[in-house]
Amino acid sequence: MSSLHPVTWRELIRRLRSIGFSGPYQEGKHPFMVRGAQRLTIPNPHEGVLSVNLLSRLLRQAGISADEWDS
């Protein structure tokens, strides 16, 4: 398993789009992205990076392996 590293919010969006998600869309307090019938709530845009802990939780919710994320 490859190791994850912190990413910016823009990098998160770019990579999720390359995996097949569309968006982000805004409804309520947090934006979300969609892939098929799957809806993934993502953090609000901000400067700085998303921690490895948060990134791993998002990937787990999206059903994305670390290897798929790195490709």
Image: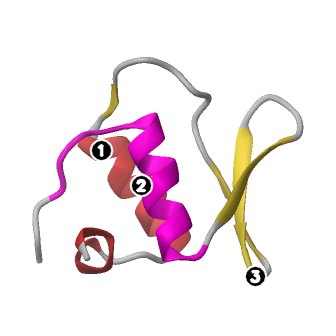
Circles 1 and 2: CB distance less than 8 Å? yes
Residue flagged by tag 3: what amino acid is it? Gly
- Label 3 to label 2, Cα distance in Å? 20 Å
Residue, disc 3: 36
The type of colouring in the image is secondary structure
Q: CA distance from mark 3 to mark 1?
A: 26 Å
Considering only vertical position in the picture, is 60 above or below 50? below
**Residue at label 2?**
57
Q: What is the distance, in whole Å, between disc 1 and disc 2 at their CAs?
A: 6 Å
On the image, the x and y values in percent for residue 60 come to 43, 67
- The amino acid type of the residue labelled 2 equals Arg
Task: Look at the image and say whether residue 65 sits in the magenta stretch.
Answer: no
Q: Is residue 35 left or right of residue 2?
A: right
Q: Quadrant of residue 6?
A: top left
* Place of residue 26 in the rendered image (x, y in percent of width and height, measured from the top left): 82, 39
Q: Earlier in the sequence, mark 3 or mark 2?
A: 3
Residue lying at the far left in this picture: please name it: 2
Q: Quick check: marks 3 and 1 in contact, CB under 8 Å? A: no
